[in-house]
Image (cartoon, helix red, strand yellow):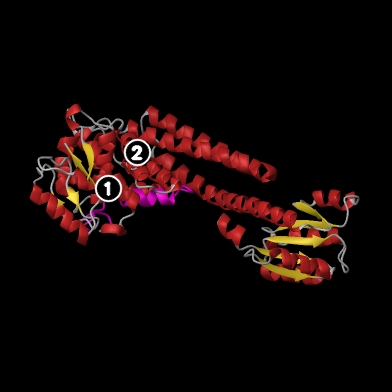
Amino acid sequence: MSENKIVNQAVILCMDGDPVMREDYKRFLKDTGHSLLTAETAENGLEAARRHRPDIIISDTRLPDSNSLDLYRKIKKEPRLDHSMLILSRRSETDPKSRVKGIDINVEDYFIKPVKKEEFLSKIKSLLRIKSLRDSLADSNKQLGHTRDRLQRYKKELGKKNAILAREKKMIQNSLKQIQLMSEERERAGKELRELYKLQKIYVYGLIDLLSSMIESKRQYHQGHSKKVSEISGFIATHMDLPRHDIQTIKIASLLHEIGKLSIPDDLSMKNPDDYTPKEIALLSRHPVQGADLLNKFAGFKKVAKLIRHFHEHVDGSGVPDNLRGDDIPLGSRIIAAANVFDNLVYRKKNGSADDAFQIMDEMTGSKLDSTIVFHLNKYVEKHPVKDTDRITSVKLYDLKPGMKLAAGIYSLGGAKLLPINTELTEEYINQLANYHKKDPIGETAFIK
């Protein structure tokens, strides 16, 4: 269950023999989006709790038909209510016994009557956030157990790799053990949920760095490729104003986009790509699927795996593995695809240049590559020219002048190619662009040499 769902649509059960308090609870929760259940006795409250499985149970310490602590123990022992958070309401701060006994059975919080609306809603909101983190951690722990089993099998398959890979696999195992230890500690120290969550993120990114290093160690002819693709992809995603979480997912997927190549033989992975046979190329074309299948075994990597699976798709539907076309291909996959091609043509080639790369990519745009992504790739080159001869300038459409030479093709927002790269602009071309823009909008910027 996501945090937003819990916070915005919680089920809350209030057990109180006082009808005034029950009405207060209804009034407090009106228009909050939460569902309220009320009960005036312990018996009715326990029955309602079993039926509706509330997120939060608020109970008066002096219900008319039950010893309150016996009731709380019943609630805590109910398997169907193990996710519910229990709050006690009592009449005075001078009643310490119920508080001490409540601590013994892990009651989450207390209210002192009379309850103020602001205090009530603030505690409800805070407890729902804690509950969201606790539920998410429980799900993660369950998935983590399955992940560890799969990882052991995977490690055996990598057992014959060189000494560097062996050390790196050992580091993965240690990282997973540390995560497991933190998860167990998280169970014992609920008040440290937020801090532990931050620590877990650090180790996840450590695992990502480790996997990236493993990929690099297998790529003799592509050292630095994954990091450069991640840099370019992050630039493009940022300039497309994507949400921060999506940008981070794309950068991670870029770093790991060749993880499927860990499963190929060493003699092939260390071979010069220019010497690949058609059979070897066909074998390598499956690496995005293999990489996605591997990452799907790790909790929290499903979005990353999806982007990796589809980064060999083409916008015209001719790619692999699923022949997706256009916007059916995840945006992150289209970004990685363009960044991957650009890096191979420029940074992995001796004396490679952005100008030569864009000459080739212009033929691929609209068939293999997304024209919008290629447009933003030009922005990257404008900010990070490879050579002095690669320097380009962005110009507003209404500032175009005859004699200017295009450093990138001009496309409509729908993907139609209007002018190819290297076109020398004339008055006629500029007028045609202006007229076309009225019917089918064109991006407001062009790139010139």
Report which quarter residue 68 is drawn in: bottom right
Q: Is residue 14 above or below residue 232?
A: below
First in sequence: mark 2 vs mark 1: 2
Residue 252, given in percent of the width and then of the height, sits at: 40, 42
Q: Amino acid at mark 1?
A: Ile
Q: Which residue is mark 2?
A: 230
244 or 230: nearer the eye? 244
172 or 209: nearer the eye? 209
Q: CA distance from mark 2 to mark 1?
A: 14 Å
* Residues at circles 2 and 1 in contact by the CB criterion of under 8 Å: no
Q: Which residue is mark 1?
A: 373
Query: Which residue lies at the image location 25% right of the left edge and 55% below the top edge?
Result: 413
Residue 324, given in percent of the width and then of the height, sits at: 27, 59
Report whether residue 337 is seen: yes
Say which element carries label 2: helix
Q: Is residue 408 above or below residue 114?
A: above
Q: Based on the picture, tell me whether residue 308 belongs to the magenta stretch.
A: yes
Report which quarter residue 344 is drawn in: top left
Q: Main secondary structure of the magenta part?
A: loop
Range drawn in magenta = 296-322
Say which element carries label 1: helix
Residue 153, given in percent of the width and then of the height, sits at: 44, 44
Residue 362, given in percent of the width and then of the height, sits at: 16, 46
The quarter in which the N terminus is drawn is: bottom right
Near mark 2 (Cα within 10 A), the count class, few <14, some 14-19 or many ≥20, is many
Q: Based on the picture, tell me whether residue 47 belongs to the magenta stretch.
A: no
